Amino acid sequence: MEIPNKEYASFKVILVIVIFIFLNFSFSYSQNDSIADHDFTRQLWFELKPSWKLSERTRLNTDISYRTNEPKNGERFVSKAEIQYQLKQLNLKNLKFNHAVTGGIGYFYINNFNAVNAFEYRIYQGYSLGFNFTKRTKFNQYLRLEERFTNLFREENSSFGLRLRYKISGIINLSDLFADKSKGFYIPADVEFFFNIKKSKQINDVIRITPGIGYVFNPSFKAQFSIGYHYTKQEFENLVRTNDIIFQLRVYKTFPLRLVKDPHEL
């Protein structure tokens, strides 16, 4: 029983480091600092991701997040909800593929300190395909189409955007190395590409690279911290391209109406 205790102590150390980073960066800049073209920014994202497993194939996923920006020129509040339906497993040669379709809606409120506040409604449809590369590693691809409605119902500064997102992600599961299989550390990493079919006036992402570390408390509850790099284009009045360093803390909790067997399900 000593090893699991050491593992949990390691998680607490990581959590303290994460909290220190959040507090440190919160006071690094003064409010209303401006961002110029090709600037580096630092952002703090805190996300709560509750979900409900409605049946063996159907899941309701939600996302509530708060995002800050350093220099302090704004903050974002995000809420999303989607339905995910897992399709019948594909068997190709020696690999078994899990795949699913999703459909959802999101609301983004952008509190700009130096400009008029903005908001966006986002509707999206997606398809994911994944498989176990080895006993400990999972590989997943996710393709998503988004319809973006910025400042809808406003006479000025309203726009419509359409884009594709393609994400490649992987997970190395370390759970049963130090404790029982139902809990322990894992290493996530993903790369996401954005293809703007029709650009929106705000936050046109180009690429995101996000490695991290996570801890599974039980199959229905896990937490994850990551440090990512985002390259973004924004076009409010002038084109501003930024290199964003993202410090991100995510908390996942599934409220099972059906039993959750795998904490890293699609």
Image: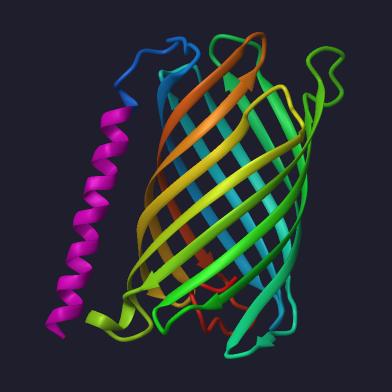
As for residue 4 lying within the magenta part, the answer is: yes
Is 153 left or right of 215, judged from the image as shown? right
Q: Image quadrant of residue 70?
A: top left
Q: Quadrant of residue 213?
A: bottom left
Give how far across and how far down residue 251 sits, in percent: 45, 57
Instruction: Report the quarter where the N terminus lies.
Output: bottom left
**Residue drawn 75% across and 28% down?**
199
Secondary structure mostly taken by the magenta-highlighted segment of the chain: helix
Q: How many marks?
A: 0
Q: Toward the viewer: 43 or 134?
A: 134
Whether residue 250 appears in magenta in the rendering, the answer is no
**Placement of 165 over or under 251, stated as above or below:** above
Q: How is the image coloured?
A: rainbow
The residue that appears at 51% across and 42% down in the rendered structure is 208
Does residue 117 appear left or right of residue 185 in this picture? right
Over which residues does the magenta segment extend?
Answer: 1-25
Q: Left or right: where does residue 194 sit relative to residue 23?
A: right
Q: x, y (%) of residue 71?
A: 41, 18
**Is 22 placed above or below 236 here?**
below
Q: Quadrant of the C terminus?
A: bottom right
Q: Is residue 228 above or below residue 103?
A: above
The residue lying toward the viewer, choosing from 109 and 35, is 35
> What residue is at 71 percent from the left and 71 percent from the top?
100
Q: Position of residue 218 (x, y in %)?
A: 41, 76
> Where is 60 relative to 19, above or below?
below
